[in-house]
Image (cartoon, helix red, strand yellow):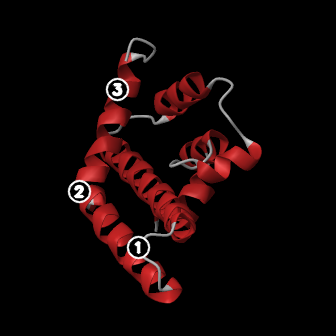
């Protein structure tokens, strides 16, 4: 929060409200449990470490989807309030700094920072992803 300009905090709060409104925590628990059970049934081995890898990757994909939903909610909330989302885009870039990219980004629970910033700054991208 020390890095954020005051206008960016409204975007962060709107993003977090998007998680609450979308019930992302509950959805992650249910999705993870269902995926785990499915993999266990398919592999026939509920104790296998290898059986958990597909669940982990799928759960991260769900998490990235939830992050995009929360970003969209923030954009819509800021627009309704007559506020620019640009401070939020700058904050994301500041926080990301030299964050991991490439192969390690597959294991990230969030979409890439460039993708999130594009969503915020590009109305066409927002329209595609947020409708």
Q: Which residue is mark 3?
A: 9
At 48% from the left and 27% from the top, the residue drawn is 87
Residue found at the very far right of the displayed protein:
102
- Between 66 and 78, the one nearer to me in the picture: 66
Q: Is residue 110 visible?
A: yes
Per the rendering, the mark at residue 120 is: none
Q: Which residue is mark 2?
A: 21
Which circle's residue, 2 or 3, is located before the other in the chain? 3
Left or right placement of residue 65 versus residue 19 in this view? right
Question: In the image, is residue 54 above or below residue 102?
Answer: below
How far apart marks 2 and 3 lie (CA) works out to 18 Å
Question: In the image, is residue 129 above or below residue 75?
Answer: below
Question: In the image, is residue 27 above or below residue 77?
Answer: below
**Quarter of the image where one finds residue 113:** top right
Disc 1 versus disc 2: nearer the observer: 1
Task: Where is residue 33? Give x, y as percent.
Answer: 33, 71
- Between 87 and 93, the one nearer to me in the picture: 93
């Amino acid at each position: 929060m020390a890095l954020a300009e005051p206008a960016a905090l409204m975007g962060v709060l709107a993003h977090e409200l998007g998680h609450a409104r979308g019930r992302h925590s509950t959805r992650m628990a249910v999705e993870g449990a269902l995926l785990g059970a499915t993999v266990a049934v398919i592999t026939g081995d509920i104790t296998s470490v290898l059986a958990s890898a597909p669940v982990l990757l799928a759960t991260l994909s769900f998490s990235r989807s939830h992050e995009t939903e929360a970003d969209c909610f923030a954009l819509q909330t800021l627009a309704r309030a007559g506020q620019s989302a640009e401070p939020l885009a700058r904050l994301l870039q500041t926080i990301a700094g030299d964050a991991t990219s490439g192969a390690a980004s597959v294991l990230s629970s969030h979409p890439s920072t460039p993708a999130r910033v594009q969503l915020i700054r590009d109305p066409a991208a927002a329209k595609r992803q947020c409708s």
